[in-house]
Structures are given as structure tokens and as C-alpha cells.
Amino acid sequence: MWYAANLIFSFEAVDKSATSDIVLEENIILLCANSENEANDKAILFGSRSNAKISYLDPVETRISFVGVRKIIAISNLDLDNKLPPGDGSEITYEILRFKSKEDVDSYLDGKNIAAQFWDAEH
């Protein structure tokens, strides 16, 4: 079965006095596994391989660290029994957001920064 795993990484300034912001990146990877538990184990393995890399974020030297797996989602294919690998039309992942108004939704669709409540049905 195919799964999408949401991996969370933190970007921390090497010089701790450089910034106080917490910056996270969420990467979504594709996994083939026999169960959700196996997919989670594979996700942790992939994420752990990315620990301690150095990059530059707005020119601050940062250390990238794997924080954890936010969620694992079984991919839904058009064939409904999910025996085929993901392809055109497969639902890979989803997010549910709650907005205060229709205007906020329109602004969000236009790519503007809008306050929204993130809601995850699993938590």
C-alpha cells in the first residue's frame, strides 16, 4: 500500500543570538509499506537521514534537524481498492483549514497571508 508521510524539520540558527524565531519545514514523502506502522518507521528513517545538515536561511547559518512525523495518510487511488500505485487523480494528502469569512478564503486563494485555524481530524 502507498502512504504519504509528513516529515517536520526545524531550522535553528547555529549562532543562537541571531534569531529567536522557530522555523519549521514540512516535507511530504511517498512511501510503500504493508501497514501504517511500517510506513511510520520508514518515515522516521528517511527523516533521520537529514539530521544536522547546514544551510543558510536569510543569510543566517542554520542547522536542519528532523523533528518528527506529523501524520501518515494512506493514499486513495481512483481504483478504490488501492492496489495500483499512485497516479493521475490519486489523493496524496489533504489539509483542513477553518477561516473566519468568505473574504479570508478568497484572500487565501490569492496567495495572501491570512489567519486560519489548522485542523487535523486525527488529533
Image (tube, helix red, strand yellow):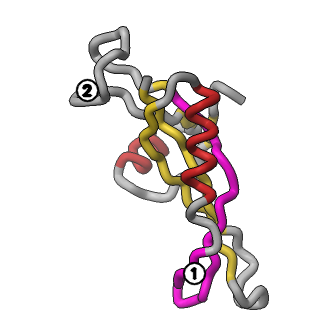
Residue 123, image x, y percentages: 72, 30
| Residue indicated by mark 2 | 89
Helix, strand, or loop for circle 2? loop
Give the class, few, some or many, for how many residues have Cα within 10 Å of label 2's Cα (few <14, many ≥20): few
Magenta segment: 53-73
Q: Residue at x 53, y 84 (%)?
A: 56
Q: Quadrant of the N terminus?
A: top left
What's the CA distance linking mark 2 and mark 1?
Answer: 36 Å
Q: Look at the picture and state if 79 lies above or below 76.
A: above
Q: Position of residue 109 (x, y in %)?
A: 37, 46
**Which residue is at a point 66% across and 67% down the rendered structure image?**
65
What amino acid is at disc 1? Ile
| Residue 4 located left or right of residue 48 | left
Q: Residue at x 59, y 31 (%)?
A: 38
When asked about the image quadrant of residue 78, the answer is top left
Name the residue beneath numbered marker 1.
54
Which residue ends up furthest to the top in the rendered image? 81
Relative placement, left or right, of 103 versus 119 is left
Mark 1 surroundings: few (<14), some (14-19) or many (≥20) residues within 10 A: some
Would residue 2 be found to the left or right of residue 72 on screen?
A: left
User: Contact (CB < 8 A) between labels 2 and 1?
Assistant: no
In the rendered structure, which amino acid carries the disc numbered 2? Gly
